[in-house]
Amino acid sequence: MNPKADDLGIYVHVPFCKHECPYCDFYKMELRIQPARTRIEYPRLILRELELLAPELTSVDRPVRTIYFGGGTPSTLPPKEVGALLASIRELLPVDADAEVTLEANPENLTAPRCHAWRDIGINRLSIGAQGFAPSELDLLERLHQPELIERILANARGAGFDNISLDLIFALPGQTLEHWQANVEAALALEPEHISLYGLTYHEGTPFGERHARGELRELDESLQAEMFRWASSRMEEAGFGHYEVSNFARPGRRSRHNTRYWNRRSVVGLGPGAHSNFGSRHWFNAGDLEGWKKSILAGGLFRSEPEESAPEVRTAERLYTRLRTAEGISAEDDPGLFGLCIRWSAAQGSAAAPWLHMTESSFALSTEGWLVLDALVESITRELFRSA
Ligand code: SF4
């Protein structure tokens, strides 16, 4: 891709949470172990980091299309400070007037006044960590809210003028039945969000859930039940008017996440804050997950990133294969003729056995819902073909 034709997304990582959920492997820490001034200081440090990066980012005209506050729990920060940061980002970089500006939020932070405050500073999309609607499931996940709160905060958000709201749900919890899962999806649909993300529970190494899983205290749900949950949710959401546009994501027409779509299209996203990753044209780098190290470096006037690297062309192709096959559009013959040709050759070699996994037309190669269930295995198989023919 010609970097001159590229545009930009900004990701701000906010590594603070009120409580560390036992399944989460993101870079984060409990806010209460930080000095009280952290919530004020952090957005200012992010701005300092952006000022250090700005000469590089503005070396060619690159409009900013999306800004995403993720975490961690960015809704723990004071809206006023985040508003000052947003205003400064707009001064430093050419941010589109209609840029998508997303805030990840937990229900317990979304009181009515705070919803108004977030809307007033220019947040126009909320991504809310609902995760489930059964009290016992929320207890297991150690979430800090109860199901009734989700309905209340949706009303708060709508009252403040938010018309682009996403809910996150987790499925395949230990002991969860198909009926429990169906009730969660129905409860989410009843709240009429514009977007829903569904994630299967993963027992990440190094997390309390990972340890309990290793000790045999938590058992993974049977694979065929997980597949049934995924299939059912996909068809129910489509029936309710949501497009299944990425393996984990569903949106009403015109409401796809523009920011996350940048990752799946391999467009530039620059990450700020400890633990953030950046892809900028063909280069990539990351900030290590080390708040103190990052802070020290930024205060001393230096970036805290790894050495920017150019990915090898075959690595870029393999990454593109993986991200594109996550999407409903898949790989386009027009935009990616080489990769498209490779996928067609791969499917010819598989014969009719591959048919249920694929959605192929003359101009695109994509995976079906069945294909998404075995996404990693398919990508691995096609990647082997890629490296064989390289
Ligand atoms: S799931 Fe969200 S709230 Fe829970 S620890 Fe992870 S980032 Fe924080």
Image (spheres, grey):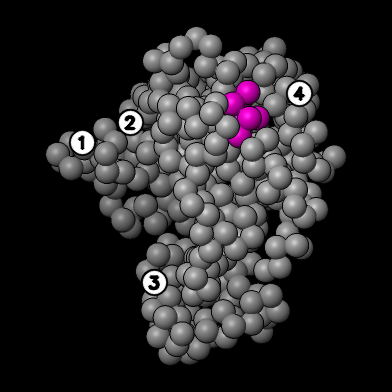
**Residue indicated by mark 4:** 121
- Would residue 304 be found to the left or right of residue 78 on screen? left
Asked if marks 2 and 1 touch (Cβ < 8 Å), the reply is yes
Name the residue at 50% across, 88% down: 345
Instruction: Please tell me whether residue 327 is drawn above or below residue 88 in the rendered image.
Output: below
Residue 184 belongs to the span the image colors magenta: no
Q: Earlier in the sequence, mark 3 or mark 1?
A: 1
**Residue indicated by mark 1:** 212
**Residue 60 visible in the snapshot:** yes
Q: Earlier in the sequence, mark 2 or mark 4?
A: 2
**Residue 70 visible in the snapshot:** no
Q: The disc labelled 3 sits on which kind of residue?
A: Glu
- CA gap, disc 4 and disc 1: 42 Å
Name the residue at 59% across, 15% down: 40
Q: The disc labelled 1 sits on which kind of residue?
A: Arg
User: Majority secondary structure of the magenta segment?
Assistant: helix
Nearer the camera: disc 3 or disc 4: 4
Residue 44 belongs to the span the image colors magenta: yes
- Residue 218 coordinates in the image, percent (x, y): 22, 38
SS type, badge 3? helix
- CA gap, disc 3 and disc 4: 44 Å
Nearer the camera: disc 4 or disc 1: 4
Q: The disc labelled 2 sits on which kind of residue?
A: Pro
**Residue indicated by mark 2:** 22
